Amino acid sequence: FCCAIHTFKRSYAQKDFLNMFNPTMMSKLPKQQALKAFGTAAAQVGGPQQQQHQQQQPAMDSSTPWVAAADGNLPLLQQSLQVLELPITAADENGYTLLHAAASYSHASILTWLLAVDDSNRRTTLLQAVDSEGDSALHYASTREAAEFLIRHGCDAAVHNAQGQTALESKQAELQETMQEDDDEDEDDDEDLGQLKRLVEYLQSLENRPQ
């Protein structure tokens, strides 16, 4: 995949970081693996003085809103959208939205802020948006809490992606694959597996609700 982030000029250090971090690709990784990769990439950008300077003066480029949404950094998300003059409905060239990113990492503050927009049309656009593979924000949801929030605000659980899967079917396939993997089991993996089971149970419960 190649994101729209590559269209902006940046320093060599930023280029190295952004080549290692692609919002769409990272969201497709298991959560703990993605977080570890994100942390490794960030740690490799510059020395302590440069990192301190970047913390004081965050560099803005076209990836920043997605990084902020995935990291749960609401102030940076708001600031970057303003600086880059992007709407909250912005998507990269793969159709990956800020709501997708927030749902991927179950950041309640980001989800709440994005869907608190007064414009009902923009809210609907966010909830109905799918990426190039047909995945909605609900397909990306990593926890039951994120899924419940999306459903409560009108996300459609019946949407099928390009593989013909609803969010439930996609998560069931992910759960089956995860349970078949026996390597590198640790407490983080157990926690992720528990979160995924709870998510699948919730999505299954939606099918039993009266129409």
Image (cartoon, helix red, strand yellow):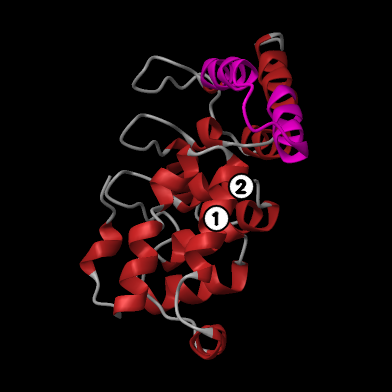
Q: Residue at x 48, y 87 (%)?
A: 50
> Crowding near pointer 1: few (<14 within 10 Å), some, many (20+)?
many
The residue segment tinted magenta is 168-197
Looking at the rendered structure, the kind of residue marked 2 is Tyr
Q: CA distance from mark 1 to mark 2?
A: 6 Å
Q: Looking at the image, is 2 positioned above or below residue 163?
A: below
Tell me which numbered mark, 1 or 2, is placed earlier along the sequence. Answer: 1
Badge number at residue 105:
2
In the image, farthest residue toward the front: 183
Residue 106, image x, y percentages: 65, 46
**Count of numbered tags:** 2
Residue that mark 1 sits on = 70
The secondary structure that most of the magenta stretch takes on is: helix
Q: Amino acid at mark 1?
A: Ala
Name the one closer to the observer, 40 or 203: 40
For residue 129, which quarter of the picture? top left
Q: Say if 4 sits above or below 151 in the image.
A: below
Q: Residue at x 70, y 34 (%)?
A: 189
> Where does the image place residue 192, in percent across and percent down from the top left?
70, 34
Q: Secondary structure at mark 2?
A: loop
Residue 32 lies, with reference to residue 86, above or below; the image says: above
Q: Who's the residue at 39% across and 14% down the image?
A: 164
Determine the image quadrant of residue 39.
bottom right
**Magenta segment: does it hold 149?**
no
Q: Is residue 118 visible?
A: no
> How many residues crowd around disc 2 within 10 Å: few (fewer than 14), some, or many (20 or more)?
many
Regarding residue 161, the answer to whether it shows in the image is yes
Camera-side residue of 117 and 197: 197
